[in-house]
Image (spheres, rainbow, N blue to C red):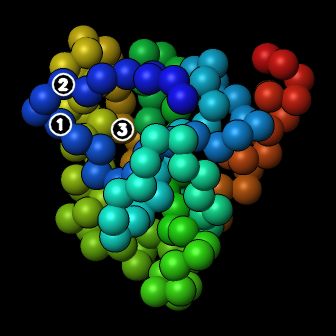
Amino acid sequence: MVLDRVLHSSVRYPFDYGFVPGTLSEDGAPLDGMVIMDEPTFAGCLIRARPIGCLDLIDSGHRDGKLLCVPVADSRKDGITSIDQIAPTQLADVTEFFRTYRSLEGRTITILGWLDHGAVPALLARCRAAAAAGL
């Protein structure tokens, strides 16, 4: 288990937050993922999840998409396949979290917006190819 960062006290992750193994984003880190959970899990927990969309943003000059997912093992979320099924206020909370948390770190961020599940395969393919190439 590795502590990656400590958040400033005024913010908290809106969903369980982690990364997709075997991927590499333009920012040089694995592709970030958020999983909509009813209860928080624990550091190091592996969750099989289905992506339903992503938050597209630029962080310090690098494209840094954030997958939004639902857990495969939660049958209550079986019918959720699109970010259109998530309350707009929840999506706004996530957007504001990243804007605030990056700002507190003194970083520049540009929120490009939410993309539905159709954008996910190309993002995953790029990030898996970058990891395989060792970029």
* Residue 37 drawn at (x, y percent): 39, 65
The answer to whether one can see residue 105 in this image is: yes
Foreground pick, 68 / 115: 68
What residue is disc 1 on?
11
The residue tagged with tag 2: helix, strand or loop?
loop
Spatial CA distance of label 3 from label 1 is 18 Å
Reply above or below: 116 against 43: below
* Residue 30 drawn at (x, y percent): 63, 31
User: Type of residue at label 2?
Assistant: His
Label 3: how many Cα within 10 Å (few below 14, some 14–19, many 20+): some
Label 1: how many Cα within 10 Å (few below 14, some 14–19, many 20+): few
Foreground pick, 125 / 37: 37
The residue at the point 54 percent across, 49 percent down is 45
| Left or right of 19 on screen, residue 114 | left
Which numbered disc, 3 or 1, marks the residue that appears first in the sequence?
Answer: 1
The residue at the point 10 percent across, 33 percent down is 10
What residue is disc 3 on?
111
Task: Find residue 89 and report its image quarter.
Answer: bottom left
The answer to whether one can see residue 119 in this image is: no
What residue is disc 2 on?
8
* Residue 43 drawn at (x, y percent): 46, 41
* Residue 72 drawn at (x, y percent): 61, 73
Spatial CA distance of label 2 from label 1 is 6 Å
| Left or right of 62 on screen, residue 16 | left
Task: Find residue 52 and report its image quarter.
Answer: bottom right
